[in-house]
Image (cartoon, rainbow, N blue to C red):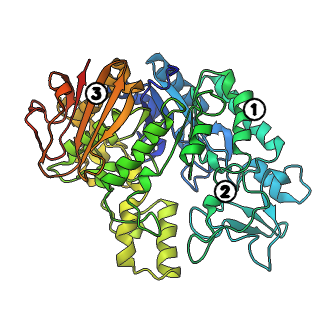
Amino acid sequence: MKKTWWKESVVYQIYPRSYADSNGDGIGDINGITSKLDYLKLLGIDVIWLSPVYKSPNDDNGYDISDYEAIMDEFGTMEDFDRMLSEAHARGIKIVMDLVVNHTSDEHEWFLESRSSKDNPKRDYYFWREGRDGKEPNNWGSWFSGSAWKYDETTDMYYLHLFSPKQPDLNWDNPAVRKEVFDMMTRWCEKGIDGFRMDVISLISKPAGLPDAPLMNELYGDCGCTANGPHVHEYLQEMNEKVLSKFDIMTVGETACVTLEEAKKYANSEGTELNMVFQFEHVGLDGDAEFKWSTRKMPLVPLKENLTKWQKGLDEVAWNSIFFCNHDQPRVVNRLGDPSDEYREVSAKCIATCLHMMQGTPYVYQGEELGMTNYPFQSVKDFNDLESINAYYELTEKMGWKPSEIFPKIANKSRDNARTPMQWDDSPNAGFTTGKPWLAVNPNYKKVNAAEQVARADSVFNYYKKLIELRHKYEIIVYGHYDLQLAEDPELYVYTRELDGKKLLVVCNFSDNEREFMPDEEFRNGEVLIQNYEGSDVFDGILSPYEAYVIYTE
């Protein structure tokens, strides 16, 4: 297996709006990130993935970009960005930018020109269609609820938006669009950034003719039909040839609806497209049958089956991104662990052990290293997230759900759970801002915060620090082959890793029950690399609630 720096790295995702506010306006910013680089250096991460910081009207928190080569006013200036990049590099930390090129903002100059007239040179930069029988051109629904088409009276036509109406989709079938995107990417690489995380990149090639899709609910066709389209690999190979291959960078694609076979193409070991992809099958396992909104816990047996499929399926032929948390996912302690005071920390460590011992590049989302939890939402008025708000009103007003039934489900899975401000210390607003925070701070910040955890040896933070140190030290953690044990056990996740005669045993009890488990004979004289019950005897055959440990043997 070819060895590279991005396989051996640990990535830390920053959602800038919620990370650190340097000027007291209640919104996180670039100078705030720069001020926390020593904290990240202490944690030991190698790469920062920066959610969008480009100029944007912020309809979807920066994922609606009006200028790819300017910085959002609220976040600072390009000079601030250059300083952050320089300071990160001085600490040995790389910066990966979010690349959002399935769509732009409707305030981008390309779209302003495109909508101005039918014969504008940039008309074909986007998807414009005549209505059908006085209605939308096809039945596609938006990922954010409602139709994926918006009528524009300027030219009496509709434009396509798979997300918000303020996020019109770019027409990648137009070579001029691809050239604009590739030239822009090249300029960022020449500036010295270290790679791209590519937002919904599997959606850039739409099916020919934009046909109706199978219904995803009573109202709209499934816009997932646009994933892994007819030319997506061709376009990414062109991107690789013209931009990516010319720089020593890391690339990861967000690939909604990706299959294992498709992922082998996106992240192939020949390096013709991307380095790795995000797949989302495992984080959808706690959804309800008809949609993602639910109060269910993540079921362990299907989770093991899914992660094992990806661990085994990509071994030697592609590369995994491994994660539980990001800006679109609720906090994993609520989904897979126990957010109560009794088990929050030990379950957060158990979850981290399970993930960070797998093959692939691990991603830590801000606050995950502290065991941050979901926010206690009381009302739809507490939401900021467009997806959550739209879903609540569509499900109650159009589909007949009772508010008392649907609200707890949306509150549990809302993206806002990940977006509450970072909890730095126990001062007002968790030390995130001296002003009024743009989104409410989780009220548990006085007991869950970075200052307290950095100082305490047995904290979640210091456990993550040790996990990262181990990955940097032991090649087997990065490159070793994975095998699952006890596949049908509903509470224990046990697996081995093997490389060049060396072996790891990873044991995680995902329950608040004591369980019996005895390591096999070959591990009895092994070294315990890490354990979340410090000093407990891992060879006594008894696992405490949420106990996890890793044994290494040669």
Q: In the picture shown, does residue 166 fall above or below 215? A: above
- Which residue sits at x=79%, y=79%? 134
The label shown at residue 367 is none
Amino acid type, callout 3: Leu
Outermost residue, bottom direction?
Answer: 400
Amino acid type, callout 1: Asp
- Can residue 96 be seen here? The reply is yes
Q: Quadrant of residue 190?
A: top right
Percent x, y of residue 66 = 68, 47
Q: Label 3's element?
A: strand
Percent x, y of residue 184 = 72, 34
Mark-to-mark CA distance, 1 and 3: 45 Å
Q: Label 1's element?
A: helix
Q: In the picture shown, does residue 203 fall above or below 140? A: above
Query: Mark 3 = which residue?
Result: 504
Amino acid type, callout 2: Thr
Mark-to-mark CA distance, 2 and 3: 41 Å
Percent x, y of residue 316 = 50, 29
- Which residue sits at x=33%, y=19%? 501
Q: Earlier in the sequence, mark 1 or mark 3?
A: 1
Estimate how packed mark 2 is, as few (under 14), some (14 to 19) or many (20 or more) residues with alpha carbons within 10 Å: many
Q: Earlier in the sequence, mark 2 or mark 3?
A: 2
Outermost residue, right direction?
Answer: 119
Percent x, y of residue 2 = 52, 20
Estimate how packed mark 3 is, as few (under 14), some (14 to 19) or many (20 or more) residues with alpha carbons within 10 Å: many
The label shown at residue 183 is 1
Task: Assess whether mark 2 and mark 1 are in contact (beta carbons under 8 angstroms).
Answer: no
Q: In the picture shown, does residue 259 fall above or below 286? A: above
Q: Is residue 554 left or right of residue 521?
A: right
Query: Mark 2 = which residue?
Result: 226
Residue nearest the viewer, comparing 327 with 434:
327
